[in-house]
Amino acid sequence: MAPATPRSNPIQEAWRERAQRERSRRVRARVARIPLPEWLQLVTPDFTWDWPHLIYIQQQLDRITSGDIRKLMLFLPPRHGKSELATIRYPIYRMDRDPSIRVILGCYNQDLANLFSRQARRIAKGRGLLGGGIKAQDEWECIGGGSFRAASIGGGGVTGRGANLIIIDDPIRSREDANSALFREKAWEWYSNDIYTRLEPGGAIIIILTRWHQDDLAGRILASTDAPNWTVCSLPAEAEPDDPLGRAVGDPLCPSRFDREALRDIREVLGLDYYALYQQRPVAEEGGLYRRDWFRYERAPYTPEGDLDLEEIVQAWDTASSTVGDYSVCVTVGVKAQCAYILDVYRARLETPDVLRQVITQAARWHPTVLLVEEAVTGIAVVQMLRRETRLPIIGVTPARGGKIAHAKANLPYLEGGRVIFCPGAYLTTFEHELLSFPVVTNDDQVDAYNIALTRIFQSGPRRRAGSHSGGKRG
């Protein structure tokens, strides 16, 4: 016969439970004094937590913990550790300090939410936090009465539940969803009618995403009256002016994982989506002043011998004298049969001596019929020096009356009418992005040079035929 199972002693069980609660209380008291960076290193020592962008995020999360802020948005490119830190570990850090905290996590679908939940639960188990009777992958409890609930956009599971901390991570799955007005409205209704109403008084909410669309969930919130209540932490893959980390313009966010070359490769593959996903600057699908459906793409005309077969080649320069601010830009445009072919766009931050050298270099490459330089600030000196030191066909151009927007509008009919053609080239991604973002883009130097060229081509009367050009050999 099998030995009889010893009967549990209620008094002993009560003492054991009491002792466990006391041990947990003492552990919690010690953890409450551990800063988040030390806790992360303690819990996951094989991760690198001291990269500058992760330190910056930790500082923002500390502000949530202290109650200094209650609404936080984190915009970062993919694969930079935002979910590992803020979605998976931060809730457990909070539970480690206070096991009664209740967390709700929302994602674009239940599978992703469950994945994050399982990873968080594994860490909670290692910290001795699991308790209670519910231990499912989409919902589990911890020893102090707290809980973790994973939900999806449009799904059920949050009704009747409150949360001290709500985290929304990856509310948009793909470009298709981002461009769907129906999906964006569904995400907004889920946020405003379902999950936001679960937030307890004094609770906090964190939204973590890469920016797919101007009207994504973050964009909709920031366009609402609730916008001033949010702290926005936006960290682009390549630093832009006034970078919150103090990076120089163009510096990678995490060079140990994605250096300049890696980001350049990603940019070439993603095209315009790079600026949304990696720079956190989404562009409306249809564009602003310039519309995407006006863009026409063709190869430039060539002779059978492989020379460019054009009536004229125009180069237009918008110059700057700085290695940190505006760009110097040269747009090279070929003309044939009343159409303008955008052949190339050169763009760099240069001091004046380097501008002069690049004007000569670009002219030697393309052999322009006319070389236009806007006579504004540094442009005046550039024109004078080039006239004195070279035999290039330099023409100084007075800045357009009425400003940049008026200048752009004057040339819109030529683009809309199909008379401006974009030729294949490495310049296209940044050039298209600037056009589609104008006039709210950070830098508009390409737009300026482009319009200088179009004004000359379409509004200055007929010009002589230039013949074929050997400077643009095929291949």
Image (spheres, rainbow, N blue to C red):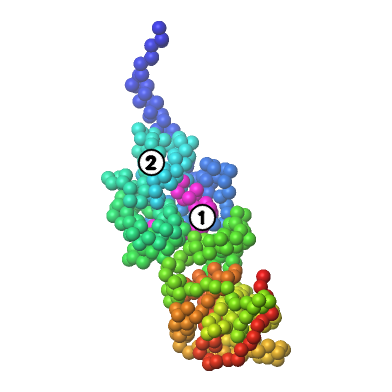
Q: Residue at x 50, y 48 (%)?
A: 84
For residue 104, say whether it is visible: no
Q: Is residue 72 located in the magenta-colored stretch of the structure?
A: yes
Q: Which residue, as the protein is rendered here, is positioned at the far top? A: 1
Viewer-side residue, 11 vs 40: 40
Q: Secondary structure at mark 2?
A: loop
Reading the image, the residue beneath label 1 is: 78
Farthest front residue in view = 304
Q: Residue 91: horizontal and vertical position, in percent?
A: 43, 46
* Image height of 417 relative to 260, above or below: below
Give the quarter of the image for residue 160: top left
Residue nearest the viewer, comparing 279 with 416: 416
Q: Quadrant of the N terminus?
A: top left
Q: Quadrant of the C terminus?
A: bottom right
**Contact between labelled residues 1 and 2, with CB atoms less than 8 Å apart:** no
Is residue 452 found left or right of 369 in the rendered image? Answer: left
Percent x, y for residue 308? 64, 79
In percent of the image, x 40 and y 54: which residue is there? 171
Residue type at numbered disc 1: Pro
Picture quadrant of residue 291:
bottom left
Is residue 461 among what the camera can see?
Answer: yes
Amino acid at the residue labelled 2: Asp
Seen from the viewer's position, the closer of residues 61 and 315 is 315
Magenta-colored stretch includes residue 393: no
**SS for tag 1?**
loop
Question: What residue is drawn where x is 28% and y is 55%?
Answer: 193
Q: Which mark is residue 138?
A: 2
Q: Furthest-right residue in view? A: 389
Q: Whole-Å distance between the Cαs marked 2 and 1?
A: 24 Å
Q: Position of residue 76 (x, y in %)?
A: 50, 58
Q: Write down the region rendered in magenta.
A: 71-88
